[in-house]
Image: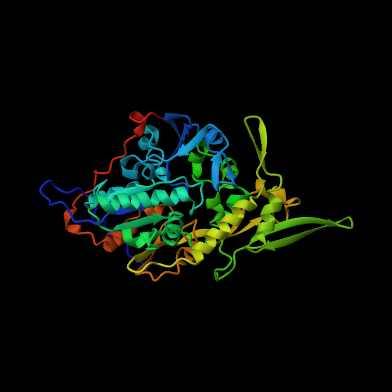
Amino acid sequence: MFVDLSSCPCFGKRSSGDPEPDRDPVLLVSGIGGSILNAQKKKKLGFQTRVWVRILLADLEFKKKVWSLYNPKTGYTESLADDTELVVPDDDYGLYAIDILDPSLMVKLIHLTDVYHFHDMIDMLVGCGFKKGTTLFGYGYDFRQSNRIDKLMEGLKVKLETAYKAAGHRKVTIISHSMGGLLVLCFMSLHKDILRQQVFSKFVNKWITIASPFQGAPGCINDALLTGLQFVEGFESFFFVSRWTMHQLLVECPSIYEMLANPEFKWKKQPQIDVWRKQSENGEASIKLESYSSVESINLFEEALRQNELTFEGNTIALPFNFSILKWAAGTRQIINNAQLPDGVLFYNIYGTSFDTPFDVCYGSETSPIEDLSEICHSIPQYSYVDGDGTVPAESAKGDNFPAVERVGVAASHRGLLRDKTVFKVIQKWLGVDQKISTMHSKTSRVVDVASTHNVIV
């Protein structure tokens, strides 16, 4: 179903004479890269440095404080700096961490939309009568970790219970974006109380998911494990974390492995990785196009990353393809595949369309082939595309396997969906918002730079 773009009636602030609107609480849940991360010394609580997202000194701070290794004993990805831990600020009822991801003065002055994450949606909801701390909350989290790790699951439970109680024991509507949908799905499947009653259905009335990679994001994730990921494109990318620096983190992130293509899903066409290879046999060279399916790609990852390493504080650290994470991620995939929507919970799905979205990835070319597979990590990928939001194929985002009340396709990019007027209009309809309370553009949503009050070094 496609909705025509029209004016968004819920922007605006209520006049002082308007009655307090009757609203069920809303909890916004971000996706990968969608939460501010601060670094702090483990034994010196108080002073924090924002390490994600930041524009100034981004690459340097990222290498010093965000580069990590997966610990198979604990299941957590831990910073290489032994005395450092990453934390998510919970200011403004959890909304600060998912609003403007770099709230520095420079970013606000140039209005860099790439880091204005949930900002416009928060603005819209406040303009529609939702009140921060009573009927509007946010949940940001350490997106390096698995979508089913205990700390993230418990954090979501606490946030849901807080919203439920603050609104007078009214059930919550969750609005999740991207990987946040997988996090919510894992919570829904795993988190039960001691009576085996679904905690999800106790606290949640509606779940609205936006651009969730239910069946994976083949092109983007395959390439992220091999060459990295660029969160900001264009001129601004020169001030941001580099693709290679990001790559060295993602190889150790369970969340990335959990978004590999689902090999059990009945894709219209199975995703694959192609490599133009130069081979020598009996002294004769030949060039051959090799193709790897989702399952066969594991062998490719292993060979391509066999020599991958980084240097940290003078030490060389090997970062091969991580089979311990792969095993954990396979367990997460089964949880996702077996998930069922609890009775009484209404499910809605918004997915992006009309953008070329990477699906198959090719490395090398017939005229410039790959000889050793490790060369892939330093090559430029070529994509074949399908319809989607530029990151998640529409086929995957629609593949929730739930009895949805409604699914809506919107022509917008992956992050653009969070500020799209059509998306806002659809969400307002699903929330049952009384549009009569709104008049003009809202100025009620304000992002405060907590560095001024919370000892955060930016």
- Which of these two is toward me, 129 or 355? 129
Which of the 4 image quadrants contains residue 456?
top left
Where residue 245 sits, quadrant-wise, is top right
Q: Which residue is drawn at 64% across and 53% down?
A: 323
Quarter of the image with the N terminus in it: bottom left
Q: In this view, does 220 lie to the left or right of 138?
A: right
Q: In this view, does 183 lie above or below 246?
A: below
Residue found 58% across the figure and 45% down from its top:
70
User: Which quadrant: the C terminus?
Assistant: top left
Which percent across, then down, holds residue 63? 56, 35
Q: Residue 384: give x, y in percent of width and height.
A: 58, 61
Would residue 215 be seen by someone viewing this image from the given angle? no
Return the residue nearer the eye: 1 or 35: 35
* Residue 236 visible: yes
Question: Vertical placement of 225 versus 385: above or below?
Answer: above
The count of marks equals: 0
Q: Residue 269 occupies which quadrant of the picture?
A: bottom right
Residue that appears at 38% across and 37% down: 103
Please name the colour scheme applied to the rendered image.
rainbow
Outermost residue to the front: 195
Residue 286, horizontal then vertical, whole percent: 81, 58
Q: Which residue is farthest right?
A: 282
On the image, the x and y values in percent for residue 334 come to 53, 63
